[in-house]
Amino acid sequence: MKKLFSRFIKYYKPHKGTFIVDMLCSLGYSLLGLAYPLISSPILDKYIPEGNIKMVCLFALALLGAYILRQGFNYYINYFGHVMGVKIQAKMRSDLFTHLEELPYSYYDNSETGQLMTRMTNDLFNVAELAHHGPENLFITTFMVLGSFAYLCTISWKLALIVFAFLPILFVITMAIRKRMTRAFRESRAAVGDINATLENSIAGIRVTKAYANEAYEQEKFEKNNKKFVVARSKSYKYFSLYSASMGFVTLLYNVIVLLAGALFCIYDSENFDYVDLVTFMISINLFTQPITTLIAFFEQLQDGVTGLERYFEIMDAPIEQDKANALEIDRFKGEISFVDVDFSYDESRKILSSINLTIPQGKTYALVGASGGGKTTLAHLIPKFYKIENGDILIDGVSVNDIKNSSLRKNIGIVQQDVFLFTGSFKENIAYGNPDASEDDIIEASKKANLYDYIMSLPNGFDTEIGERGVKMSGGQKQRLSIARVFVKNPSILILDEATSALDNTTEALIQQSLFELCKGRTTIIIAHRLSTIRSADKIIIINKGKICEEGTHEELINKNGIYTQLYNSQFSDQNISDIVDIG
């Protein structure tokens, strides 16, 4: 935990001034907390017996002034302290978002959006509360315990020592329960993440759920995770309640101890301890027990905050993508791509690509064909370094991709996928995503080349029309054309078309093919396709099966070979099952 807080402390540095004043206000708040027993004691002991109303009123006014000043300190602590916590939270969220943006493509293969959202929101909120309340609560409670003990010693040092002797019991209870409580709170946080992941997935797919009338199934999935949350949270509250009840019992025990020991002192040591001392001590004991009670209530917040910190740094410690030292910044590629003895696997259990050797000349169109799971998309994803290859190398214009900066590499590669992701916003914003510096003329020209301009202009707000969440207001063909317009604006030298039209009907596909034909002009293009009719005109067709290149050539050359490609091609016109022809394995 010490290492955890040493890393966290850096977030306080920009707010040193606020933090120092906050601690000073906490000190003032603590000192003024002692005002009531200090002022009430002489009133009870001297001025009331003397009938000195004037001094009683003066002391009462002094007490009122102390209370007003104390609440002024309380205002600063609660307002500026919370603002400091919010600013720390915002900085941590910004750092986390930046880190998430820099994590490799592969990280998101095993990470759920809902879990990441929980860490970005719920966890950091708890951390912010800890950032604000943690130091001041520890400061106030420590000072109040020591200050009240010193004051109790002025009344009766013997009775004060008896009270203080029970304090180690609280630490024993804390140490006994802390580890189990920390583990339980962490499980609880993970359960919240599971709920958010299920919720995010279910809401995103609500239209599919309704189409299949699977509301009951989704409800069942949600309730399963909801029950896990109840179990995990109940477990955390079990340990917290055990801790709270134990601590609460010890603090209440002080009342019994003070009453019993005080009574004995009154009886057997009446010269040094009388009823007034006992009453004063009983009133003042709350100064000692109150901060302990505050500490009990704070402990749950501490556990939530520490758990949030652990989960935050768990992501922050995930290795980010880094450019090689002295990596090159290349403004524009010519576009020749070479795979040299490339091997790749996602894990040790199965090799996806094996000994791939392939050169795609500048400006040529190559098609990758084969059964699903054969490695076509993986091969294309290795070019922009979405994944790190095990062996071999990939060269662009004779330069290893490892020697090129990631940003430079990816700016030169355009990808059109079957599953188009569009951001909530307008047509203009989504098209300009390909190049944030694009002018309005560039956006209009790109929409025209993608055969989307007429549709956009038919809308009431034209390019400023909102597309809805993920383009929900658009058809599949319109989404695809928008993604093509986005690549036109980007103007890359290398183009990857990954099943770009496989989900479209024949009429829409024909329209999209016109846009894609325009997009491919002058670019090195890799087409991944199942519909072989769409890639007949490719400069070369590569057949990939079980991670290896089995055949390559033009459409005519491959047909004449009468091999796997011929069987694949014929199967699409004879309704024959591809899995009967190619061993998918």
Image: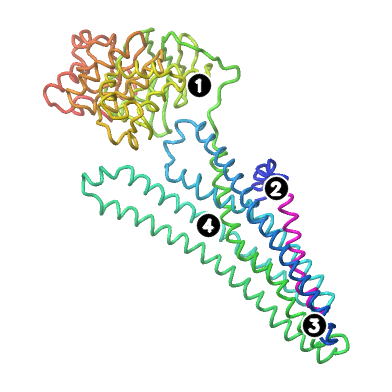
Asked whether 248 or 72 is in front, the reply is 72
Of callouts 2 and 3, the N-terminal one:
2
Q: Which residue is mark 2?
A: 18
Of callouts 2 and 1, the N-terminal one:
2
Q: CA distance from mark 1 to mark 4?
A: 40 Å
Q: Which residue is mark 4?
A: 185
Of callouts 4 and 3, the N-terminal one:
3
Q: CA distance from mark 2 to mark 1?
A: 39 Å
Q: Which residue is mark 3?
A: 44
Camera-side mark, 3 or 1: 3
Of callouts 4 and 2, the N-terminal one:
2
Disc 4 and disc 2 in contact, CB within 8 angstroms: no
At which x and y percent is residue 279? 76, 84
Disc 1 and disc 4 in contact, CB within 8 angstroms: no
Q: Which residue is mark 1?
A: 407
Residue that sits furthest to the left in the current view: 574
Kind of residue at badge 2: Thr
Q: CA distance from mark 4 to mark 3?
A: 48 Å
Can residue 498 be seen in this snapshot? yes
Kind of residue at badge 3: Leu
